[in-house]
Amino acid sequence: MKIRLILCSATMLLLAPMMAAADTGADTYNTACAVCHGAGIAGAPKLEADAWKDRLAKGEETLVKHAIEGFQGDAGFMPAKGGRADISDEAIAAAVKYMIAELSK
Ligand code: HEC
């Protein structure tokens, strides 16, 4: 009985940081990115597979770099970190991962 409890707690401890990472991505996206990417404002590609096909081909690393440093493309201007310099690089990377995951749903 006790052992099962300990095992269960250990699993929770292992899972918590992973769940936190997923939350960070979704939270960051919703607070800092959805304002443009949700509605497709100012040329921002909406979270729809068609709009992202060519972008996904650049690879996750490049997309994360462009999200952190900003990116001027044909469609418009992606401000560095969506204009939120206060957000950490890690949280931006998590947001991009979240976007990629949403696109492949
Ligand atoms: C002010 C509006 C705006 C906000 C806020 C914004 N974006 Fe963007 N984003 C754009 C536009 C416009 C583009 C398209 C640029 C182009 O390709 O011409 C873009 C493109 C991108 C791309 C694709 C880059 C590429 O290489 O094709 C990624 C990834 C991205 N945004 C991530 C994010 C993330 C993550 C956030 C939140 C932290 C965010 N964006 C917030 C406007 C915005």
Image (cartoon, rainbow, N blue to C red):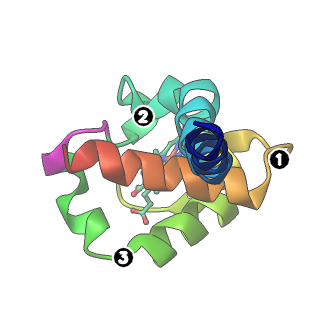
Secondary structure category for the residue under label 3: loop
Q: Position of residue 81 (x, y in %)?
A: 68, 50
How crowded pointer 1 is (Cα within 10 Å; few <14, some 14-19, many 20+) is rated as: few
Q: Position of residue 54 (x, y in %)?
A: 22, 66
Q: Which amino acid, by three-letter code, is at mark 3?
A: Gly
First in sequence: mark 3 or mark 2? 2
Identified at 59% across, 49% down, the residue is 7
User: Which is more foreground, mark 1 or mark 3?
Assistant: 3
Residue 65 badge: none
Quadrant of the drawing holding the C terminus: top left
Q: Find disc 1 in the rendering and name its residue.
A: 85
Q: Find disc 3 in the rendering and name its residue.
A: 59
- Image: 18 above or below 83: below
Residue in the foreground of this view, choosing between 31 and 69: 31
Residue in the foreground of this view, choosing between 8 and 41: 8
Identified at 53% across, 43% down, the residue is 22
Residue 50 located left or right of residue 38: left
- Image: 39 above or below 5: above
Q: CA distance from mark 3 to mark 2?
A: 19 Å
Q: Which amino acid, by three-letter code, is at mark 1?
A: Ala
Q: Find disc 2 in the rendering and name its residue.
A: 37
Image quarter for residue 41?
Answer: top left
Identified at 46% across, 55% down, the residue is 97
Asked if labels 2 and 3 touch by Cβ distance under 8 angstroms, the answer is no
**Does the numbered disc 2 mark a residue whose Cβ is under 8 Å from ligand 1?**
yes
- Image: 23 above or below 21: above
Q: Which amino acid, by three-letter code, is at mark 2?
A: His
Secondary structure category for the residue under label 2: helix
User: Which is more foreground, mark 3 or mark 2?
Assistant: 3
Q: Position of residue 95 (x, y in %)?
A: 54, 47
Q: What residue span does the magenta drawing correspond to? A: 46-50
